[in-house]
Structure formats: structure tokens, C-alpha cells
Amino acid sequence: MQTVNIRQLKTNPTTALRSAKEDDMVVVMNRDHPQALLVDLERLALPDLGSVRVALAVSLFRSGAVSAGFAARMTGKPLPEMLTLLSSLGIPLTGANPADAREDLDAGRQWLARKV
């Protein structure tokens, strides 16, 4: 097990990620106190890592942290399949603000009108 402080993590995250992949885990220290753990998902030897990736992607999309396209790339699924999954889970594919949804629809209609 290795430790890195936040400054080291900011300046060279690749080293910390590589260490997490090669070692068991990396402890991230904040002012001499353990703050977080970096663990490579592959090393957890989960029976169904694909499902874990899907659950993470869905959770991140639901919280607004990632787009549907990014969530699809995280899972290795095509975007239409990811959109179908999100919709089947009852997760709105548009923002919570109805005005944003109307703006998105208007922008889509304008784009379609130009393509014809």
C-alpha cells in the first residue's frame, strides 16, 4: 500500500492510478490524515465488473456529473442503448428545469431544419 498527498495527486494523478493498479490500493492523505482510497476496479475481482461500471455511470448521470454520452462510453454501450437504459430506470434524460428541455428541443428542431 502506498500513500500520496493531495499535492502529489494533483500534479501527477497517473502515478497514483498506476500504483493503484499495481499495488492493492493508494491512500490519499490530507494534512497527515487519510482522506480517500484509490482502488483499481479490476483488482477488486468483482464477479460482474460490467454491472458495477453501469451502476456507476447511471449514478453519475443521475447526479448530473456526466453526460449520457460519457456514461455510455464508461459502460462500453452504444448511446441509444444507454439512453434506453436510463429511460427504463425512470431517469429523466433532460435537465430538471422544463425551460432547459424546451430550449434543447428548439435547438434540435432548428438543427434538423438546417439539415433538410
Image (cartoon, rainbow, N blue to C red):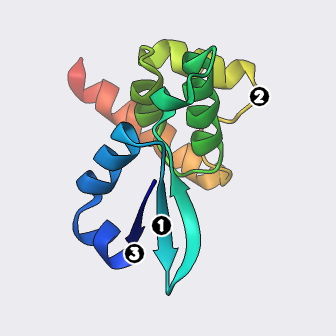
Mark 1 Cα-neighbour bin, 10 Å: few <14, some 14–19, many ≥20: many
Q: How far apart are marks 2 and 3 (CA)?
A: 37 Å
Identified by mark 2, the residue type is Gly
Identified by mark 1, the residue type is Val
Residue ID for mark 2: 90
Residue 28 badge = 1
Identified by mark 3, the residue type is Ile
Tell me: 59 left or right of 29.
Answer: right
Question: Height in image: 16 above or below 94?
Answer: below
Mark 3 Cα-neighbour bin, 10 Å: few <14, some 14–19, many ≥20: some
Question: Height in image: 55 above or below 97?
Answer: above
Residue 107 badge = none
Q: Which of marks 1 and 2 is in front?
A: 1
- Give SS at disc 3: helix
User: Could you tell me residue 47's position as x and y percent?
Assistant: 63, 14
Tell me: 115 left or right of 53.
Answer: left
